[in-house]
Amino acid sequence: SKTEDNALPFDTDNKTGFENGRFQNNFDMYGTLKFDKNKSVAFEPDESLVPEKSNKQNNLNKDITDILEELAKKEEAVGDFYRERAYRAAIKSVEAYPKKIESGKEARKLKFIGPSIEAKINEILEMGTCSYKSGYPDSVERQIFNVMIKIPRIGRANAIKFMMKGYKTVEELIDDPDLQPDQKYMIEYRKELDKKIPRWEMKLIHKYIYLTLKQLDDRYLAETCGSFRRGAEFSESLNIVISHPDLKDDNATENNDNFLKKLIYDLTNQGFCTDSFLMEPYKYLAICRIPPLNPKARPYLRRKIEMRAVSYERYWLTILAKTGDQTFYKSLQKRAHERGFKLSDTILAPIEQNNVVGKPLKVNSEDDIFRILNTKYLAPKDRDWRNP
């Protein structure tokens, strides 16, 4: 098997916390929550929580949308999800348009069509293709931009500022005086850290951290969120949410920080965590690799793991938010607001008169959140709305 030479230094049977393929603390490491036999979780679509559908069957502008779809996929491939979403929103508008589009100016009248996409539509109509389909993702400027937007605390605006400094290669960025240590690290090891993590390896990483937590205190809770929890076969990083009954909102910052330091210390001593960077008082970016039992075996790659400790009251709210995907979660937040609630990764509370947020409601599971919002429960695997 893939892990034969690098087997973990512990068992993976029921003795280490598994029961019928799941951990005993009522969370499922495989991405789909399961409940007791008397509680059905069969997915029944709630019409208000179904992504808006386009008019693909009667698309009169397929020549345009096919090329825009190619551009969207290119943006997705290089990690520019902002532009990808812009293209996909434009595609829906064009697909739903009941007439054949004759010009970019005509398309500009549609929702989500800005000047940039208008120009591309003009080119498609005139030339039958778009010059942006080839070449531009591989330009030096775009390569630098795509590296920068993946670096912690950079974002699009700062990435553009770095590009304006005139760098000709990505390697030149490492010596920039405005970069922080973790940012330089991400650039230096970007080729390794950008490699996708297969699901089997994500499971091993999850379990390694989980068992380390249990050695500290059996009451710790942990869930790996993001695309892993939604059932993805590959992911760029892991996002782990951790909590404990003693972590309360009134003392969360200090306690969470101290706990994470202890966890990182233990993982480092075990040879699992190779580097770590404090992102916030309650969040670390850890660079980890599974330690091999066989010293002659090829070592595992470094992997990015974001660990955050949250108060017990916020645990399930944070899990819901960090599981995503973003399209689904924003839709759920909209549903909450329509029904008179504020929903975020820190609070679920009624909105009272004058838009005053009321007392936070107690949440003991994801199911509680859906029930309070009078919405059918969707398993994590059914929340991948951006790429259905």
Image (spheres, grey):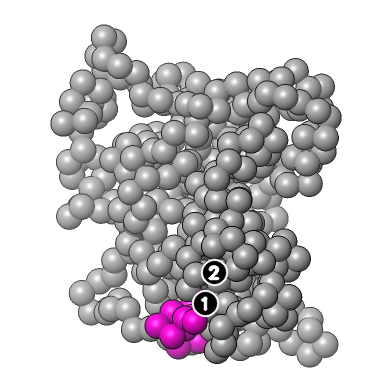
Quadrant where the C terminus sits is bottom left
Picture quadrant of residue 231: bottom left
Question: Cβ–Cβ below 8 Å for labels 1 and 2?
Answer: yes
Residue 218: tell me if it is visible.
Answer: no
- Identify residue type, mark 1: Asn
Q: Is residue 187 inside the magenta stretch?
A: no
Callout 1: SS: loop
Q: Where 268 falls versus 15 (above or below)?
A: above
SS at mark 2 in the image: helix
Counting the numbered discs, the total is 2
Of residues 385 and 5, the one nearer the viewer is 385
Residue 241 drawn above or below residue 72: above
Quick one: label 2, few (<14), some, or many (20+) residues within 10 Å? Answer: many
Q: Which residue lies at the image location 60% right of the left edge and 51% below the top edge?
A: 131
Taking the image as shown, residue 38 lies to the left or right of residue 119, namely: left
Q: Which residue is mark 2?
A: 64
Residue at 39%, 55% (x, y): give it: 229
Q: Which mark is residue 124?
A: none
State which region is magenta: 47-61
Q: CA distance from mark 1 to mark 2?
A: 5 Å
Q: Residues within 10 Å of mark 1 (few under 14, many from 20)?
A: some
Quadrant (top left/top right/bottom left/bottom right) for the N terminus: top left
Dot 2 amino acid type: Ile
Which of the 4 image quadrants contains residue 230? bottom left
Q: Position of residue 186 (x, y in %)?
A: 60, 28
Judged from this view, the residue extending furthest toward the front is: 126
Which residue shows up at 26% across the image and 14% down it? 297
Residue picked out by circle 1: 61
Q: Is residue 55 left or right of residue 168?
A: left
Q: Nearer the viewer, residue 233 or 134?
A: 134
Within the magenta stretch, is there residue 48? yes
